[in-house]
Image: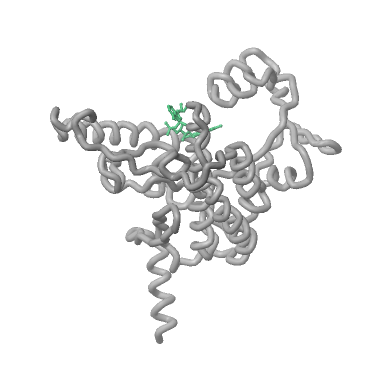
Amino acid sequence: MRREGLFTRGDRTFGSLHKLLLEGPVYASIDLADTDEKRRFLRQAHPIFFMPLERAGIDPFKDKFPLTLRYEGTMRGTGGLRLAGEDCRTTVAGLYAAGDAASRERVMGAVSGGGAYNASWAICSGCWSGRGAARHALGAGKSGGPDRRALKPVGRHGLEAGRETDAPIDTTALVGDIQRDVLPLNINFYRSESGVAGALGRLDALREALGGSVPGTVQGRVRAREAAGMLTVARWMYTAALARKETRGLAALTEYPALDPRQTHRLILSGIDGIAVGTERVPHAEELGRADGQAKGEAS
Ligand SMILES: Cc1cc2nc3c(=O)[nH]c(=O)nc-3n(C[C@H](O)[C@H](O)[C@H](O)COP(=O)(O)OP(=O)(O)OC[C@H]3O[C@@H](n4cnc5c(N)ncnc54)[C@H](O)[C@@H]3O)c2cc1C
């Protein structure tokens, strides 16, 4: 890993990359893989790593390429659509979720699952949800086929159904505004109550921008819906971050640097215009015993 004035050769600098990035651009090169055998091994071990670099015309074994961090802590890392049954059903009838889109909390707790957990969760939940969805479809019978059921679209956000003014939605500007509050490490990684609350207030205010008319092209419609999805997920993410007044796994707030056993619960968010926060007990969590002990101590 290289930075101007700093050259770290072959070091595993976990924990410091985010600090280096706050000081300026950071570059890497995999030039220690100096034989065909090593290069072949790396390519086979992690093809997804090489794909975007090669598409950008970068030879990672020779060229320097920029490093950055995309913090995916609260939503993609552990959270996601809440599963309401072992067949990966959600609370929306007929909607089944798997992999990154589904909550992984029951498998991972409060941390993300790199190093095979994510991939194995994707494969397992993909099988379970596929089976569940197929059963649901078969249960609907032939008379319940999509062309015979009275289906009603419920989506509004980023769609014509949610249009309130004639001015077109400027999706490029909207996505840029969302990213300004989600990508910076000093908001989303080094989280403080005031920083996150400020970002959430600005994101809440962006909802108005979704009330415009949706571009007529296929790409424009997809882009408007994507922007609506990004905005909603960002608001869920920061709402959840503020609801957990402790530091646990990937969830951290500088004002609450320690784990609080009394907050050993899952956060359940629902709603889009107004977001409600509920909790769900984690009955097997061992720190709950400590929390009960503390509560008894407080009562006596
Ligand atoms: C750089 C990197 C390294 C990782 N390393 C590890 C690791 O070491 N170990 C580990 O366990 N996990 C790792 N992961 C995580 C793991 O890859 C994911 O958890 C897993 O791939 C999730 O699978 P998925 O099927 O849910 O989603 P994805 O693999 O993201 O598949 C979703 C697919 O849906 C497609 N799609 C999206 N929108 C649409 C649409 N509207 N219409 C049609 N198709 C669409 C996408 O193009 C994509 O092909 C890593 C991820 C990344 C990015």
Q: Quadrant of residue 99?
A: top left
Closer-to-camera residue (172/3) = 172
Residue visible at 31% across and 45% down?
90
Closer-to-camera residue (73/97) = 97
Tally of numbered discs: 0
Quadrant assignment for the N terminus: top right
Q: Is residue 269 above or below residue 209?
A: below
| Residue 203 locus on image (x, y percent) | 57, 52
Residue visible at 58% across and 21% down?
51
Identify the coloring.
one colour
Residue visible at 64% across and 19% down?
54
Closer-to-camera residue (269/48) = 269
Quadrant assignment for the C terminus: bottom left
Question: Residue lying farthest right?
Answer: 5
Q: Quadrant of residue 43?
A: top right
Residue visible at 59% across and 40% down?
175
Closer-to-camera residue (35/139) = 139
Question: Residue lying farthest top?
Answer: 36
| Residue 249 locus on image (x, y percent) | 51, 53
| Residue 173 locus on image (x, y percent) | 63, 40
| Residue 2 locus on image (x, y percent) | 78, 33
Question: Residue lying farthest front?
Answer: 166
Q: Is residue 36 above or below residue 295?
A: above
Describe residue 241's horizontal placement relative to residue 59 as left or right. left
